[in-house]
């Protein structure tokens, strides 16, 4: 089947000219009648015969030699009706292929004469398929029809985008009703990003402003998909924050990679169907092509890490070719950091941004936002008081308890901590394994049992059988390299294992158990009709690890340890395994393999080091061996390698070399590694870098302030940095006050929202010579308050404003992009 051949046949049915700036009667456009005819009615059987051959292949219809003449004659009679149809091209296109086919059938009541029932059905299928091609031609030939149809479809599409993405799961808030879904506006927390290679952190919306190609890195649970949802909904509604006004009028395409991971990046006409948009068939012919060709698209490619490793290069080629073919569109591509190397898309002018771990202020804001959302459905005063008490005690616990502070680094983990803290009336488990076990207990059993809820589906499964069945689904996804499975496959998988689980077998078949797991566990969802996945990849990884450990399949893990999307599963397996199993797994990661590439061997050894902190009990000899094998690997030779080491976690701090005897270039890489570890233990290592004269080292240390305890970092790091040519970042009032206690600095970068009064009071006026306002100050900016800084010489603004007034005389203003 050749689509181009079908298009040529359809085009032959119509005259080449005719108005395209208004609706036109179809009868006046056909080429076999009128003053400008190029066909005769005797040509219709020829065209019909060719269409029967090609369209039958397109719709997988088998045409026998005996039926072919009768079907050709029937289709020719249908095509003849185009010369008498009482529709214009716009009305016909709005009818759609099915209704338009019925309209032609009414106009040719004798078309099926002589056909048996089976051939009549075949003719109906051919007629509808041909009508789809006819309407595509009519849409493409007339800019008026295309514009009218595009506008109508885009209104519907925008509503559907909002309906599909304007909600978030906040774990454990709604402990009575399912699902735990909340409006995006109520639940969304602005995420912080940092530019790869240095620079101040900034809210994601601000960092994205003015950029048309961005590769965004973020660890599991850091909020990548949430940001994609936020952008899609904001653009679809036309309700945009000031920094993103440049996206107004764009058409968002939410493109989870897992939906097309093995088929390659879809062409424009296949974008919506590839991501299973339910009304993809209703898009006007050529619509997506027109959107992209006019540079109106916002393409949100979410989850490069969910493509198989051997398919990522093909995806990368598409992300090189498509932006070049369709200039003017905005691209945001997201990935876990380990899945793509540094500068993966740099040659295509993609800016690389990284989602920062939640700062102390971000954690506080999330906890307060979570509890505010939880209060919405509470009417009892005593319950409200209890919830307020839980909120304050949790805030104190996260600030004071190191283990909890280390866990509360991203929205997912913060949500789990909030839910568990409330569910357990102020008690929190410590450590990763304990946290996930407690979360599963809350979601799978206690939430319903402790509220005396009767299962609405009549199924009452204890916690362990639910976990066993969920593990089977997670393990299937792990083995098959998937983060989503067909519903039919899920039912088949459950059907294989239900007979081995008596509690489940007694209560229903695969369909009933599947619906129960979907509706009552809070862990599964159906993102599109016919598919199922886990609400978050982290739960899938944890349950996969449980399945692997129960099966003692550690060789299976070791064989796949070089694959970055197995890292979390292996770490969690270590936390779940017994001491002898941990030792076996770690020894396997260290062991030389004949078929291993050097980069894979290095990856395995670093992964072994990363797993140490998750081992509850481990032979000291094995621990020592891991240290010995990995000590020489922690001298990164690139910024990419430096960041990768930092993502391993605090254990790396014990293995980093003494920075006192290295070059400035290597010292910078060591600073990148240490500041990538959001744990106050990193301060002890950074102290040994604070006296470096290198600007790159000093800038890296200054820019990391907000990740650590404010006062301690100020005293031990900020106070000792050489001030020359260095901007000192300030993101909140605590840092502003701490910098003032240090006597102020000549060059200060304001990376958070402050009032002029706060800055006038907090900055040391007699020292300030250069001020950088690295946040959006709004369209009208009165800077007369800067007169309190008599030595100020330079003012930098990171955002172009509509009007800047009141700048003191003698102050040079530098605006980004100006």
Image: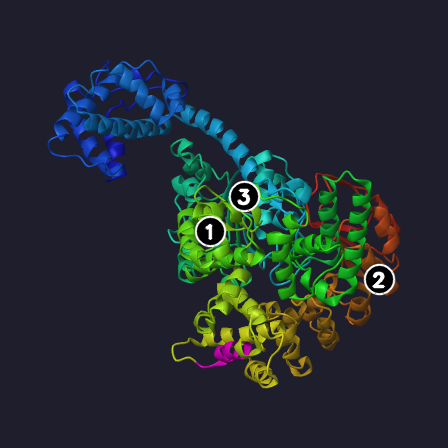
Mark 1, Cα crowd under 10 Å, few <14 / some 14-19 / many 20+, is: many
**Left or right relative to 437: residue 726:** right
Name the foreground residue: 721 vs 108. Answer: 108
Q: Which residue is mark 3?
A: 458
Q: Are marks 1 and 2 in contact (CB under 8 Å)?
A: no
Q: Position of residue 308 (x, y in %)?
A: 43, 59
Residue nearest the viewer, comparing 771 with 555 = 555
User: Which is in the foreground here, disc 1 or disc 2?
Assistant: 1
Determine which of the numbered discs, if any, sits on residue 71 in the image.
none
Query: Could you tell me how far apart the alpha carbons at marks 1 and 2 are, in whole angstroms?
Result: 45 Å
Instruction: Residue 51 in the image: state x and y as whole percent.
Output: 21, 31
| Residue 580 appearing in the image | yes
For marks 3 and 2 on the same chain, the one whose residue lies earlier in the sequence: 3
Residue 588 sits inside the magenta stretch: yes
Closer to viewer: mark 3 or mark 2: 3
- Of labels 1 and 2, earlier in sequence is 1
Does any portion of residue 324 appear in the rendered image? no
Local secondary structure at mark 2: helix
Q: In the image, is residue 413 above or below residue 77?
A: below
- 656 left or right, relative to 713: left
Q: Quadrant of the N terminus?
A: top left
Residue 123 vs 25, above or below: the answer is below
Tell me the chief SS of the magenta region: helix
Q: In which image quadrant can residue 621 be found?
A: bottom right
In the image, which disc is placed on residue 257?
1
In the rendering, at what x and y percent does residue 295 appear?
Answer: 48, 40
Which range of residues does the magenta coloring cover? 582-592
Q: Earlier in the sequence, mark 3 or mark 1?
A: 1
At horizontal 72% and vertical 73% (from top left) the residue drawn is 686
User: How far is mark 3 from mark 2, CA to CA?
Assistant: 60 Å
């Amino acid at each position: 089947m050749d689509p181009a051949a079908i298009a040529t046949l359809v085009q032959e049915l119509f005259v080449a000219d005719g108005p395209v700036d208004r609706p036109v009667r179809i009868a006046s456009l056909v080429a076999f009648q009128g003053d400008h005819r190029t066909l005769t009615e005797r040509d219709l059987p020829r065209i019909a015969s060719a269409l029967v051959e090609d369209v039958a292949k397109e719709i997988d219809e088998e045409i026998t030699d005996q039926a072919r003449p009768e079907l050709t004659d029937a289709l020719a009679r249908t095509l003849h009706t185009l010369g008498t149809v009482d529709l214009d091209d716009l009305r016909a296109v709005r009818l759609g292929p099915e209704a338009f086919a019925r309209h032609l059938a009414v106009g040719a009541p004798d078309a099926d004469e002589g056909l048996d029932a089976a051939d009549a059905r075949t003719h109906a299928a051919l007629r509808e398929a041909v009508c789809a091609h006819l309407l595509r031609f009519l849409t493409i030939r007339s800019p008026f029809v295309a514009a009218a149809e595009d506008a109508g479809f885009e209104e519907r599409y925008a509503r559907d985008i909002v309906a599909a993405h304007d909600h978030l799961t906040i774990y454990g808030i709604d402990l009575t009703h399912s699902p735990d879904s909340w409006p995006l506006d109520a639940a969304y927390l602005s995420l912080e990003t940092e530019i790869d290679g240095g620079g101040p952190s900034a809210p994601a919306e601000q960092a994205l402003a003015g950029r048309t190609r961005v590769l965004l890195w973020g660890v599991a649970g850091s909020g990548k998909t949430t940001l994609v949802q936020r952008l899609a909904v904001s653009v679809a509604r036309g309700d945009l924050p000031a920094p993103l006004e440049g996206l107004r009028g764009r058409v968002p395409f939410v493109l989870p990679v897992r939906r097309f991971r093995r088929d390659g990046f879809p062409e424009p006409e296949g974008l919506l169907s590839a991501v299973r948009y339910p009304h993809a068939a209703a898009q006007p012919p050529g619509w997506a092509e027109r959107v992209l060709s006019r540079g109106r698209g916002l393409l949100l490619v979410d989850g490069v890490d969910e493509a198989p490793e051997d398919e990522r290069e093909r995806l990368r080629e598409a992300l090189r070719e498509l932006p070049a073919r369709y200039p003017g569109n905005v691209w945001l591509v997201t990935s876990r950091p380990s899945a793509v190397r540094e500068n993966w898309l740099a040659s295509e002018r993609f800016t690389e941004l990284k989602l920062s771990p939640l700062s102390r202020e971000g954690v506080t804001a999330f906890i307060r936002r979570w509890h505010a959302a939880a209060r919405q459905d509470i009417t009892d005063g005593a319950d409200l008081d209890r919830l307020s008490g839980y909120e304050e005690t949790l805030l104190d616990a996260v600030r004071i308890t190191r283990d909890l502070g280390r866990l509360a680094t991203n929205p997912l983990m913060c949500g789990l901590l909030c839910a568990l803290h409330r569910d357990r009336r102020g008690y929190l488990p410590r450590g990763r394994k304990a946290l996930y076990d407690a979360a599963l207990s809350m979601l799978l059993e206690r939430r319903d049992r402790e509220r005396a809820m009767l299962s609405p589906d009549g199924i009452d499964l204890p916690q362990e059988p639910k976990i066993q069945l969920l593990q089977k689904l997670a393990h299937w996804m792990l083995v098959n390299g998937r983060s989503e499975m067909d519903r039919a496959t899920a039912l088949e998988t459950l059907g294989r294992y239900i007979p081995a689980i008596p509690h489940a077998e007694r209560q229903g078949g695969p369909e009933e158990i599947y619906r129960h797991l979907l509706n009552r566990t809070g862990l599964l969802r159906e993102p599109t009709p016919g598919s199922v996945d886990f609400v978050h990849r982290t739960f899938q990884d944890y349950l996969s690890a449980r399945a692997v450990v129960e099966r003692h399949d550690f060789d299976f893990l070791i064989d796949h340890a070089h694959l970055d999307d197995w890292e979390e599963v292996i770490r969690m397996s270590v936390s779940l395994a017994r001491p002898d199993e941990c030792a076996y797994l770690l020894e396997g990661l260290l062991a030389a393999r004949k078929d291993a590439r050097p980069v894979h061997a290095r990856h395995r050894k670093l992964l072994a080091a990363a797993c140490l902190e998750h081992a509850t009990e481990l032979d000291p000899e094995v621990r020592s061996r891991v240290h010995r094998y990995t000590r020489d690997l922690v001298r990164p030779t690139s910024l990419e390698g430096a960041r990768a080491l930092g993502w391993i976690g605090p254990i790396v701090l014990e293995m980093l070399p003494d920075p006192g005897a290295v070059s400035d270039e290597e010292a910078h890489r060591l600073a990148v590694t240490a500041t990538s570890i959001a744990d106050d233990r990193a301060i002890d290592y950074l102290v040994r870098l604070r006296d470096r004269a290198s600007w790159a080292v000093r800038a890296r240390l200054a820019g990391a302030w907000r990740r650590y305890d404010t006062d301690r970092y100020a005293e031990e790091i900020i106070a000792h940095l050489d001030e020359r040519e260095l901007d000192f970042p300030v993101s909140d009032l605590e840092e502003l006050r701490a910098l003032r206690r240090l006597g102020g600095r000549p060059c200060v970068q304001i990376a958070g929202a402050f009032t002029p009064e706060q800055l006038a009071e907090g900055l040391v006026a007699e020292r300030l010579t250069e001020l950088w306002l690295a946040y959006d100050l709004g369209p009208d900016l009165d800077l007369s308050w800067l007169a309190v800084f008599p030595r100020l010489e330079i003012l930098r603004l990171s955002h172009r404003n509509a009007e800047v007034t009141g700048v003191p005389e003698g102050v040079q203003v530098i605006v980004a992009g100006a």
